Amino acid sequence: MTKRSSSEISSAETPSESIENALASLSTLLQKKQKELVEREAELSKAQEKFEVERSGCYGDTAPSDVLHLNVGGKSMAVLRRTLTSVEGSMLASRFSGRWDDSIEKDENGHYFIDQEFDLFEKMINYLRHRSNETDQYPVKSPCSFNPAKYRGEVEDFYRMVEYYGMTLGIFPSELKVVYKNGGEDAVTLPGLLEVNATEWCTLEISRHGHNRVISAYEVTLGPVQRVQIGWLYTPDKTHPSYGNSIGVGDVENTLSLDLSRSCFLNNSHRTDISGLELKEGTVVRSEDFGNRWFVDGRLVASINEDDPAVTITGASEYDAKYMAYMIPLLSVKGDAKISAIEYRN
């Protein structure tokens, strides 16, 4: 009997045998992949257990779904931990993260004590609660239902408390809104409320979201940029032709800006050169008092005050004070940037 080679045996397989062998190989591969998947799930489970142990060691036995009982100015309140920690980076979120539970003051019933007026604190917490249910159809408005003429002291007390807890941008948020852009739909993207990635030249407004507080100062942190103008539009008429103009902030009527691309200050296209300005990633530009003082990386570079150690400029102060409430922060940019701070006028 003649012995056949393996290649001869393979070529002699019937179609049915070939299918059976292929299925057997596939079954073996699936079993191998399933085993790998089980092993990975086991590793993830161990990692999760380790994380929970480490978290418990740092924060105690806490979870976002914890119901915390508060004593606010002598009145009781129950609130979820995730509500109190919903504004990332705030002092309130840090305080109730779980790390400091043992050190927070408590009353005789073991309730966390908050030394604030109940009505004011409740307004802030209710806003955070409502925000968790927000939809496009039913947006949440910030708690600004005060009558300033009648309750001015209460307004200031509320602003002061919100500022104390580092919650200002959480309770009174703003967002970037594109008012002009070159290029197609993908030319400008907004990865966050206050961030922009622009492959083409565009102009954006820092728009108040759900409230009417007036922005008096803001700062911009630059990413990789090719060109940038940071400034203000000063007119109560938002239909003004300069609004969203392709030229850029400061180069058109009723706008002023600091132009790092050309190292100058612009007011109605009138140019004042400022030496030493650089267009580089990481630069922080701050505009205060509606564009009357300008800082770059903490250095005062331009001011309307002749006594300041900076280039003297013609700023927004020359305009009637009634227009200050209509000063609109604008940013023209090609590249990446984010609004890293905002201040409101009380």
Image (cartoon, helix red, strand yellow):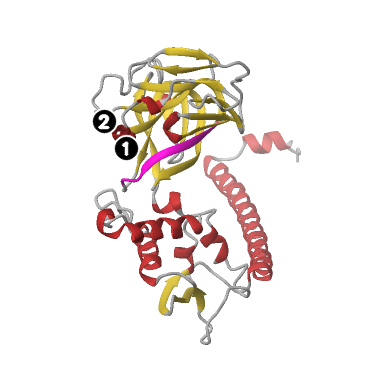
Q: Amino acid at mark 2?
A: Pro
* Position in image of residue 231 (x %, y %): 43, 26
Q: Amino acid at mark 1?
A: Ala
Q: Quadrant of residue 327?
A: top left
- Counting residues from the N terminus, which is met first, the one under dot 2 or under dot 1? 2
Provide the residue span drawn in magenta: 212-221
Residue of label 2: 236
* Position in image of residue 164 (x %, y %): 50, 58
Residue 325's label in the rendered image is 1
Q: Is residue 217 magenta?
A: yes
Q: Are marks 2 and 1 in contact (CB under 8 Å)?
A: yes
Left/right placement of residue 3 relative to residue 253 reads right
Q: Is residue 21 magenta?
A: no
| C-alpha span from label 2 to label 1 | 8 Å
Q: Quadrant of residue 161?
A: bottom left
Q: Is residue 186 visible?
A: no
